[in-house]
Image: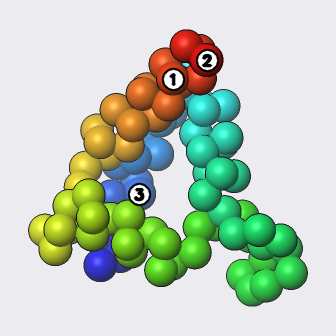
Amino acid sequence: MTPKVSFWFQTMVAMLRRPWLWWTAVRQMFRMTRRRWWTRPPYLPVPDRRYMRFRLETAYGTDGPGRAADVVRYLEWCRASERAS
C-alpha cells in the first residue's frame, strides 16, 4: 500500500497553508530517514519503504493511506509535544 499522488498533493497543499508546521515537518522527515541515507539509492532523505508500509498498515489497515488532515493533525501533535518538553 503506497500513498497515491493525490494524497501527497493534498498533503502539500495542506502544509502550504500552515507555515508554522514547516519546521516540525522537516524535523519529522529527518527523524524517519534511514541512517546514512546519502550512501544508498535514491540518495535522498526519504523513509525506508518497508518502514512506511508498516506505519501505514498499522495506522489504517488495508483501507488506504489515510488523509492529508491526518498528517496535519500528527504534525500539530508533534509540535505541541516538542513545546511541552
Mark 3 vs mark 2: which is more N-terminal?
3
Query: Above or below — where is 26 with respect to 37?
Result: above
The residue at the point 83 percent across, 71 percent down is 36
Mark 1 vs mark 3: which is more N-terminal?
3
Give SS at disc 1: helix
Could you tell me the amino acid type at mark 3?
Trp
Could you tell me the amino acid type at mark 2?
Ser
| Rendering coords of residue 47 (x, y %) | 59, 67
Closer to us: 6 or 72:
72
Q: Which residue is mark 1?
A: 81
Mark 1 touching mark 2, by CB under 8 A? yes
| Foreground tag (1 vs 3) | 1
| Rendering coords of residue 3 (x, y %) | 34, 69
In the rendered view, does 48 fall on the left or right side of 10?
A: right
Quarter of the rendering occupied by the C terminus:
top right
| Rendering coords of residue 49 (x, y %) | 51, 78
Could you tell me the amino acid type at mark 1?
Ser
Q: Which residue is mark 2?
A: 85
Q: Which residue is mark 3?
A: 8
Q: Whole-Å distance between the Cαs marked 1 and 3?
A: 24 Å
Closer to us: 53 or 15:
53
In the rendered view, does 47 fall on the left or right side of 13?
A: right
Give SS at disc 3: helix
Taking the view exactly as shown, the residue that stands out farthest to the top is: 84
